[in-house]
Image (cartoon, rainbow, N blue to C red):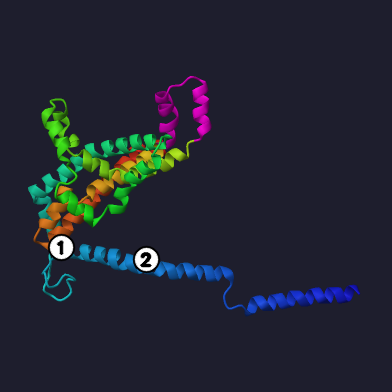
Amino acid sequence: MAKNKNTKVLTKKQLAHRRVKTTFLSFERRRNLEGIVFSIPWLIGLVWFLFIPLFMSVKMSFYNVNGQDLWCNTGLSTWVGFDNYVEVIKDPEAGQVVLNSFMSALYQVPVIVAFALFVAVLLKQKFPGRVYFRVIFFIPVILSGVIMSYLFSDNVGNISVFGQIVANNQFLSGFGGIASQIGHIMWRSSVEILIFLAALQSVPDILYEVVDLDGATAWESFWHITLPYVSPFVILNCIYALVDSFVDSTNPVMSLLNGMDKYGERAALSWLYMLMTLIVILIFILFTRRWLR
């Protein structure tokens, strides 16, 4: 009897083993295949719209490019080596524009990040219509792109009422570079606000309850509880704001690139600008890495 029972168990195991073997694709393999299929359009777009243009840009920076030979492979374009980079470095206008771009980011980034943190702290509080205010600050994320580039190129971001206030106020006139672009700064801080909102949700509420029992004020709880917890996100938003500032459509370097006639010098300037941007970001990370621990 026991022998027959063991035989039935072995037979079931063998059948199950055969059934697994005869299956064309297992569940795990099917899931992996589905992921690959869904990733193929993204990979094609990544190669076509990112890697190929990057390769063309690097190649063009070493050529005197003819407009009919953008691939630099028909003989119409001539190899010039690093001459394009030398010409860009020698150009005083390009150097001044790049310097102005970095100096502009130097004061815009802290203002944007501080404003984003201030708004995120307010939006975390419970008040009537909080959801609608969050949607309002999320709208720039939806509309950002080519449309906003055209709007800001027509000075839509520089709201005239702020310019009039600055012009009529002696104290604010010293901060005209910031105050006259309040609309632009508010618009560019939308992603940072969302990041700070997500960071504030991770702060344990019990910590605020403890400091409230100890008699701490809202200002003290912000400095001793909120800010230490969100400090890594402050650094993240600073990096994001830096990159966003360097590639913004209103950046003078972008205007200079669009106005250059020689494709080779344009490509050389773009790569030099990118390298300087990476160096600035790496220096910033080195100086702030202790806050990431």
Amino acid on which the number 2 mark rests in the picture:
Trp
Picture residue at 17% right of the left edge, 59% below the top: 267
Mark 1 or mark 2, whichever is nearer to me: 2
In the rendered structure, which disc, 1 or 2, sits on the residue that comes first in sequence?
2
How many angstroms separate mark 1 from mark 2 (CA)? 34 Å
Q: Position of residue 213 (x, y in %)?
A: 52, 22
Q: Is residue 228 magenta?
A: yes
Which quadrant of the rendered structure holds the N terminus? bottom right
Q: In terms of depth relative to the viewer, which is nearer, 218 or 287?
A: 218
Q: Position of residue 284 (x, y in %)?
A: 31, 40
Q: Residues within 10 Å of mark 1 (few under 14, many from 20)?
A: few
Amino acid on which the number 1 mark rests in the picture:
Gly
Q: Can you say whether 127 is above or below 132 in the image?
A: above
Q: Which residue is mark 1?
A: 81
Magenta-drawn stretch, dominant element (helix, strand or loop): helix
Picture residue at 12% right of the left edge, 67% below the top: 65
Residue numbers of the magenta segment: 204-230
Q: Is residue 49 magenta?
A: no
Q: Are marks 1 and 2 in contact (CB under 8 Å)?
A: no
Secondary structure at badge 2 equals helix
Residue 96 sits in which quadrant? top left
Q: Which residue is mark 2?
A: 42
Picture residue at 13% right of the left edge, 59% below the top: 265
